[in-house]
Image (cartoon, rainbow, N blue to C red):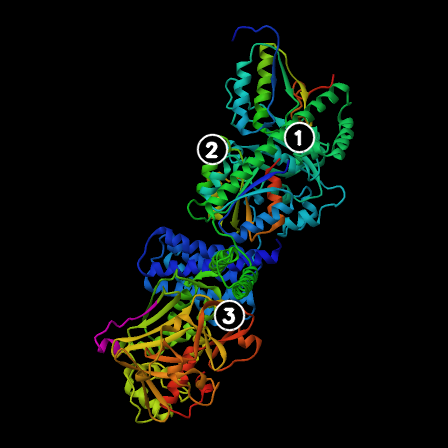
Amino acid sequence: MDMNEIKEIFFQECEEQLAELESGLLKLNDGDRDPETVNAVFRAVHSIKGGAGAFGLDDLVSFAHVFETTLDCVRSNKLEPTQDVLKVMLKSADVLADLVSASRDGGGVDESRSRSLVKELEALAHGGSPSSSGHDAPKPAAKAAPAPVAKVDLPKPSDDSGFQPVPFSFDGFGEDDEPAIEGSVYEVSFKPRRELYSKGNEAALLLRDLSRLGEMSINCDTDALPTLDKMDPEASYFSWKISIRTTRSEDDIRAVFEFAEWDCDLEVKLAEEASSNEELPMVPVPFDLSILDDSAGGEDEEKTAERGVSEETVAAAVSAAETASNVSRTARAAERKESAAAAAAAQNNAAAAAAGAGQTIRVDLDRVDRLINLVGELVINQAMLSQSVVENDATGTSAVNMGLEELQQLTREIQDSVMAIRAQPVKPVFQRMSRIVREVADMVGKSIRLVTEGENTEVDKTVIDKIAEPLTHMIRNAVDHGIESPEKREAAGKDPEGTIKLTAKHRSGRILIELADDGAGINRERVRQKAIDNDIIAADANLSDDEIDNLIFMAGFSTADKISDISGRGVGMDVVKRSIQALGGRISISSRPGFGSTFTMSLPLTLAVLDGMVVTVAGQTLVVPLTAIVETLQPEAAAIHSFGANQRLISIRNSFCPLVDVGRVLNYRATQANPVEGVALLVESEGGGQRALMVDAIQGQRQVVIKSLEANYTHVPGIAAATILGDGRVALILDVDAVVAASRGQSMKPEMSLAATG
Amino acid sequence: MKKKVLTVDDSRTIRNMLLVTLNNAGFETIQAEDGIEGLEVLEGCNPDVIVTDINMPRLDGFGFIEGVRRNEKYRAVPILVLTTESDAEKKNRARQAGATGWIVKPFDPAKLIDAIERVTA
Amino acid sequence: MAAKKAGAGSLKLAAVLDLNEASNLHGKLVSMRGSDLKIDASGVERVGVQCAQVLVAGVKAWEEDKKSFLVEKASDAFQKTMQLIGINNENLVAKEI
């Protein structure tokens, strides 16, 4: 793992923290006062700040810092999280999200916005607590460590007279003015307290680090040590007087004791040259300290040799000592084995703990995509194999057939499992929507609550990535045009705060996303008029309410200037519809004047496979998505009714349904086929109405792997995608809605071409 | 024997940084995601030093440090706290809880290794 | 004082003489008073000051008892740490005979 990978992890984690942050803030907004909620919110920001600091993302750090400070006030009950406070915080969360994406993808953020929020946050922090930590340097750049308090008892330079009585920096003095070669001699007096040891510090290690700064002599004062029976083995009795000759500064010496300075008495003085060794019997500490640095000690041959040499300088190495050190090595080896075993056990423990705690792994999406593609190929291959076996084995009872059936079962299961890997809850998308509602509502001066439901509904990642945009568009429309202004709402006897409800659920192998507002609903009169003005419908067209509502999805409906005064919507809904259709989805609207509108999107769970009915039309093989088909029927001559020039209806159980000749719509043939010779597929269309698609014959049902036509060829009106059949032939997948729309277009405006709606 | 470091941090980013830094420096690294897990993992892992964050879910760094210091077997293990430089108050609380030393964020590999070397034999 | 034991006692020091070991070591020394003591520090890898305090107190106690207290074998780590912290008591810094 390198830093780039960790950075990638950081950004992933940011996404999670931002989601956590937002949902926490929303909970607080709903009156949740659980301290853990506040803590979680605080941690989210803190965590982002921590990681950002490590990567030097200064803008992110400084904003997160101010945000964190204000959140800390809430956490410590210095600031009441009122609606107003939360409004600022939610906006800050949005800015934080912007900063994260700017850090990841480059690009700028709205600086004036973040600056004004910083001011608001600071005002909250200060207002909440006059003595708060708001004075903390918000810039990570301010690296200057707080000056050690102890610095004041710096000794005077030994020769005062040589200096002008001008204030100067002792830091500079220590570092620059010291003779570099010889160094100066400092006297250090060090008396640890009991707490120093109980907090895991060790005087011996401090002395070791000190000895590394230069040449050191030491005197251990043991006078305070009581008798053995009176002593407390965990108390601190020893203290030291150390004389050290070093080229380093006094601050460097004090820095050695940085972790311990609260738990010891420490004095550091520049020694007067003569007195250094006078009174105290100092023990020089000249030997090499490598053994103390390195617990691996005896493993290293070179080190052993080195140590041998250094020992010679301290004392003569006699055979007894040699024996002793051999013994010590053996003992150490044994110890090592034990520790190794312990380490292995520990690792097992840790692994077990990890397994218990986190039951997810992170996998590069590319790998999953590759797997999904391969499984797709496997499915095709399995189908081809089955087909050729069936063709060559008329009896259909052989063991090969049995095996093939099992293979098919297994392939199917593998495919489902693999698809499940890429399935994700829609939650992140929904959470993004709440931000959009906030922003747009703010902009247009409305007060709107977004309620979400079924956020954990899972759908393939490729679908999730693609629904965000149309959904955003629809949410904007709902806020801008759907919900009325607070005044209008109040006048209508409604809650001045509007509600938008976003719901996701699974419905028969598809995901259904509903977007409902409690606004004024579609103003049908005006939509109808607009459609007539724009030549979308004939002035005398007789349309049901549903059909009028669905006019807003028509291309060309919104091309005219602003129609936002229509209390429905319309801005770019044709675009929305097209992108939903491109996903193999459907969208429809239902509206109740005065009570609001509900958009319903139905999307496939995956863009990789599809259950289809394989049909023949004019000698071509087509696949019709099974989800679109309500039922299939064999038309009888008596059920077919013609009207107009070339319109036909089929009567099904006492109701009439327009008959659509697929071959004709797709221009496979010039003349209409005889319905009695074909099969009718009853399909549900967006407007809620049903249509009967006429095809020549049904070949069968099968799962097909979707191959994009756009990616490999070009967009063909009426065709959603392509697939490869078991016999290796390419078949086109019918875009049912496009075909139906084309036929509806014909019924409304005969000259309207397929391409315009497809 | 490699020195063994137990790290306790809820941030996946920081955990990975610690892991990479410590492994590169030749330490054996064991990781926990919060104070509770830290105390669980502590048993049987016998670390030479512990590095812990303060703000964590379930059990924060202060509670974790107190837990270690109350543990008969591991109370002497040095504990380094990951803290932000400006936060003197937190540093103080950590010290009161029994922290041995601290590593000032933003995270810097050299500072981390230096601090570990200082508190371990 | 406990009844005099015949012969000399001996004590092998633990590998890690840290805060945790100090009380342990103290207890052992207290229980071994009254007879000569030979200490084996050959397996010591780490010495904390608190154990050093206990050992120095031990030396003094044995002096008082007029018994011999001697570190016979010592690891490098033991010797060097003792020197580092300025303990040069002959009884503790093993003298190569």
Q: Chain of mark 1?
A: C
Query: Is A491 included in the stretch rendered in magenta?
Result: yes
Viewer-nearest of discs 3 and 2: 3
From what the image shows, is residue A611 above or below residue A350? below
Labelled pair 3, 1 in contact (Cβ < 8 Å): no
Residue at (43%, 44%) from the top-left corner? B59
On the image, the x and y values in percent for residue A259 come to 56, 41
Is A441 magenta? The answer is: no
Q: Secondary structure at mark 1?
A: helix
Q: Amino acid at mark 1?
A: Leu
The residue labelled by disc 1 is C84
Q: Is residue A425 above or below residue A200?
A: below
Res. A289 in view: no
Q: Are marks 2 and 1 in contact (CB under 8 Å)?
A: no
The magenta segment is A488-502
Report whether A381 appears left or right of A650. right
User: Which disc is residue B71 wearing?
Assistant: 2
Q: Examine the rendered structure and indicate whether residue A634 appears above or below residue B47.
A: below
To which chain does the residue with label 2 belong? Answer: B
Query: Which numbered marker is on residue A706?
Result: 3
Left or right for A388, reference A738: right
Q: Nearer the viewer, mark 2 or mark 1?
A: 2
Query: Can you give x and y, in whole percent of width and height, for residue A576 in the image?
Result: 42, 77
Q: Give residue A449's quadrant in the image.
A: bottom left
> Would residue C52 be found to the left or right of residue A526 on screen?
right
Q: What chain is tagged by disc 3? A: A
